[in-house]
Image (cartoon, rainbow, N blue to C red):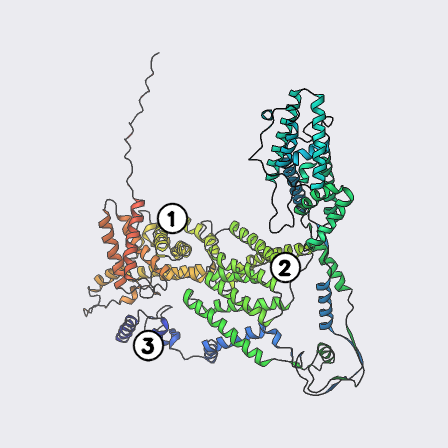
């Protein structure tokens, strides 16, 4: 037994020395000492010299050595970069050496007569036809209505100014003629006083006549020759009325004339002045001189003129001079000369361009013009020179060269090597993200990511209308988290257009859906959330495709159909990813949040058996799960994995339920009947091995199976170990030799917890029975007891590989006690019922 003790001692020393380092460092240090160690991750042999049962002590076979070489990191990196470069870098395989713009190395002759289409020249001509196509215009009804509204506002402004000037004629034309009234209203104050002066000579006191106005605005000046004649006519008509009417009527007429002059002066001062952008003001004095009938005619005909002009349409960019000429011609034909100066500025100030480009009809016409362009054909005869030596190759030369296979297509090694370097950088970046966020990824996980990445260039090569980036983002993000999902999807988006011919709009649209899936997929918990994600991806992909192609010249109904198709394709990729996800999970032994939720369903076969066959163990499992979940949630661990792993960690107890005290229900203890600590220890240890058998039979993921052995680690089965020690002190043979008890026979086979999640479950499993036994303990007493248990696990080196720190151990202890307090809160003490119920007294009425 000494070799075994020496081996175990040496192994423990190395493990303690490298407890804070990786498994690779420990392995190098261990094997550098040339120690033949049992497989730490598997079951330990009973004797160290039992090399037949120790696989690690056997020499490697040729197949194992080949697998070791093939799986070496440098070779894996080379294979990954080479495969991705060859799959994505499609355009570098068939690149012409004699391309457009290059000089011909020699004179090349046509090997045969042919007619070749110059696709480049045809595409250029069709593009020119599209660009040179005349735009088709249409009436913008909103702009037309706005012009009508402005015109009505201008006319209303004119009516308001006329209302300010007062009624005209201001008296009956039988008393004063229209011409005289117009003169008297517009006459200057000097002329008006002259007219009034003639009246004072006719026995009318000056005091009875209106006084000169000092506040009225100056009337518009009139022509002097006509003004003199108008003044004489006004004097004559006033004198004639004076002779035919009494003094009161005459004075009332004079007052009416004075009031009309005042109103006219006020309105004249309110006329808008011309600004810097106008050649003349919008309104002038002629507006105030129109009779009501004339003004109504001006309004009606101005609206009709505007209707005609707007119906014909005013294009954008029409020079103002052209518009002014058109308006003047229309006004001249419709209105008298006196109203022309009024209607023209109103129309010019109101009318705005109302013709806009009809995008759909313009696109249709442009496409028709492009399709009418006949393909450019090049006729060559046999032996005719295609291109002279040193001559720059044109599109026509290249078309003929490529037709006869003389363009020397082949691998562009410089471009391919450069692209390979770019792929190497992308692979390195993914590896850095993996090391940062998913350091425990297995080789099979890397293979799955590699296969999913390779699927995208295959889809592009098949010329499908969209890439599968939404499915890639969904699967990578759902399996390995958002950082890897974003990294893979984003880098594929960058590499695809460099190495393959793909439309930017469909690439960016599908990439947006892939990035959304990469971020969200790992957080989904139900089918409803998955359905919402599929709808969101379809909507995002379709909308982004529509936005990116809005200015492409495609007819709108065609663009809407293509956008709807992109949205449906995005949704279809999510459905494909959902359908393939269970198969990939089984094939690559993956755990996703949704799969963990499904496995934690109490109606699963194993959990139903556990509850039915081992009810005590099932209750123990539920309490351990409660403790572990609370700790995992606080420490930021995978709560779903902890919950599911805890539910299955003791399924092996179903092989012998009565061998565990929680299932004996107060009956006879089976181990008392066995009365052999070694056999009892084997029964207890067997619940781990049997649990692993059941887990494999029911195809539980490896991450869940890990909870079965790791929650016990290599802990000592203390009760039966001490019982064996006590019995060993009693001699069993005639020589009085005491049998030595080996601690290894009473320890679980391990491994110890390899993750924080399994470490938390080990601690919760160790503390569950102790917490259940506490009834009236205080918080401090419970915390002290839990700390002792956790300290014992720490000192037993059970947590050296779990990643848990000493600070977290104290935090876990407090969480366990808090959960225990919630389960053992005080309840109200209800009074005891009487042995026999007393009749209820009836109240007398």
Q: Nearer the viewer, mark 1 or mark 2?
A: 2
- On the picture, is 332 further left or further right than 206? right
Q: Earlier in the sequence, mark 1 or mark 2?
A: 2
The secondary structure type at the circle numbered 1 is: helix
User: Label 1, on which residue?
Assistant: 615
Q: Is residue 456 above or below residue 628?
A: below
The secondary structure type at the circle numbered 3 is: helix
Q: Residue 578, position in %: x, y?
A: 55, 57
Nearer to me, 183 or 402: 183
Decide if residue 546 is in sight here: yes
User: Label 2, on which residue?
Assistant: 549
Contact (CB < 8 A) between labels 2 and 3? no
Q: Earlier in the sequence, mark 2 or mark 3?
A: 3
Q: Earlier in the sequence, mark 1 or mark 3?
A: 3
User: Label 3, on which residue?
Assistant: 29
Q: Estimate how packed mark 2 is, as few (under 14), some (14 to 19) or many (20 or more) residues with alpha carbons within 10 Å.
A: some
Q: Residue 191, position in %: x, y?
A: 64, 36
């Amino acid at each position: 037994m000494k070799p075994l003790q020496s081996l175990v001692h040496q192994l423990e020393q190395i493990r303690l020395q490298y407890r804070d380092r990786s498994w690779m460092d420990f392995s190098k240090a261990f094997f550098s000492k040339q120690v033949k160690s049992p497989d730490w991750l598997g079951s330990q042999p009973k004797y160290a010299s039992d090399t037949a049962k120790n696989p690690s002590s056997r020499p490697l076979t040729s197949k194992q050595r080949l697998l070791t070489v093939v799986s070496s990191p440098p070779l894996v990196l080379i294979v990954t970069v080479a495969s991705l470069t060859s799959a994505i870098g499609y355009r570098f395989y068939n690149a012409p050496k004699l391309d457009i713009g290059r000089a011909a190395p020699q004179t090349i002759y046509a090997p045969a007569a042919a007619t070749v289409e110059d696709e480049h020249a045809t595409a250029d001509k069709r593009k020119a036809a599209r660009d040179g196509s005349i735009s088709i215009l249409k009436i913008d009804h909103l702009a037309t209505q706005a012009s009508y509204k402005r015109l009505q506002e201008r006319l209303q402004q004119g009516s308001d100014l006329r209302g300010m000037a007062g009624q005209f004629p201001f008296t009956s034309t039988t008393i004063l003629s229209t011409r005289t009234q117009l003169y008297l209203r517009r006459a200057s104050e000097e002329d008006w006083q002259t007219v009034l002066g003639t009246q004072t000579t006719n026995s009318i006191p000056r005091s009875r006549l209106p006084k000169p106005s000092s506040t009225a605005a100056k009337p518009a000046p009139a022509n002097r020759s006509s003004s003199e004649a108008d003044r004489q006519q006004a004097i004559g008509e006033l004198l004639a009325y004076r002779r035919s009417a009494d003094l009161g009527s005459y004075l009332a007429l004079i007052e009416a004339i004075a009031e009309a002059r005042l109103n006219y002066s006020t309105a004249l001062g309110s006329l808008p002045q011309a600004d810097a952008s106008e050649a003349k003001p919008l309104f002038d004095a002629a507006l105030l001189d129109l009779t009501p009938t004339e003004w109504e005619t001006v309004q009606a005909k101005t609206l009709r003129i505007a209707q005609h002009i707007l119906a014909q349409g005013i294009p954008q960019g029409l020079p103002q001079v052209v518009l002014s000429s058109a308006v003047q011609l229309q006004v001249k034909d419709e209105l008298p000369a006196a109203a022309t100066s009024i209607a023209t500025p109103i129309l010019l100030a109101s009318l705005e361009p109302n013709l806009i480009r009809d995008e759909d009809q313009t696109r249709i016409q442009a496409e028709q013009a492009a399709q009418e362009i006949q393909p450019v054909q090049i006729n060559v005869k046999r032996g005719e020179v295609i291109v002279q030596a040193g001559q720059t190759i044109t599109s026509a030369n290249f078309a003929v060269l490529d037709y006869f296979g003389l363009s020397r297509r082949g691998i562009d090694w410089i471009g391919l090597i450069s692209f390979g370097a770019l792929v190497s950088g992308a692979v390195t970046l993914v590896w850095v993200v993996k090391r940062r966020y998913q350091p425990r990824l297995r080789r099979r996980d890397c293979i799955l990511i590699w296969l999913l990445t390779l699927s995208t260039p295959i889809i592009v090569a098949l010329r499908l209308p969209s890439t599968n980036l939404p499915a890639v983002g969904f699967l990578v993000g759902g399996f390995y988290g958002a950082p890897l999902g974003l990294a893979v999807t984003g880098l594929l988006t960058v590499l695809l257009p460099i190495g393959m011919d793909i439309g930017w709009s469909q690439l960016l649209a599908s990439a947006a859906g892939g990035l959304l899936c990469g971020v969200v997929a790992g957080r989904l918990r139900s089918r409803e959330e998955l359905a919402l994600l599929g709808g969101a991806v379809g909507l995002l992909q379709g909308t982004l495709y529509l936005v990116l192609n809005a200015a492409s010249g495609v007819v709108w109904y065609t663009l809407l159909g293509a956008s709807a198709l992109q949205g449906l394709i995005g949704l279809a990729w999510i459905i494909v990813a959902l359908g393939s996800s269970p198969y990939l999970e089984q094939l690559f032994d993956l755990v996703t949040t949704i799969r963990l939720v499904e496995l934690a369903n109490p109606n699963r076969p194993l959990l139903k058996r556990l509850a039915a066959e081992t009810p005590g163990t099932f209750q123990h499992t539920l309490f351990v799960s409660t403790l572990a979940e609370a700790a995992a949630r606080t420490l930021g661990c995978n709560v779903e994995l902890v919950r599911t792993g805890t539910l299955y960690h003791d399924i092996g107890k179903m092989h012998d339920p009565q061998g565990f005290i929680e299932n004996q229900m107060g009956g006879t203890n089976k181990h008392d009947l066995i009365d052999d600590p070694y056999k009892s220890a084997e029964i207890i240890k067997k619940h781990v091995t049997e649990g692993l058998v059941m887990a494999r039979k029911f195809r539980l993921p490896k991450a869940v199976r890990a909870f079965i052995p790791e929650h016990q680690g290599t802990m000592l089965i203390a009760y039966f170990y001490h019982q064996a020690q006590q019995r060993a002190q009693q001699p069993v043979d005639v020589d009085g030799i005491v049998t030595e008890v080996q601690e290894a026979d009473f320890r679980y086979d391990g491994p110890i917890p390899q993750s924080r999640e399994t470490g938390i479950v080990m601690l919760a499993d160790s503390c569950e029975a102790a917490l259940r036994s506490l009834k009236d303990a205080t918080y401090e007493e419970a915390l002290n007891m839990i700390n002792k248990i956790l300290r014992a696990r720490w000192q037993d080196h059970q947590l050296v590989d779990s990643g848990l720190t000493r600070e977290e151990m104290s935090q876990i202890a407090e969480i366990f006690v808090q959960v225990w307090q919630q389960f053992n809160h005080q309840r109200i003490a209800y009074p005891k019922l009487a042995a026999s119920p007393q009749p209820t007294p009836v109240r007398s009425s």
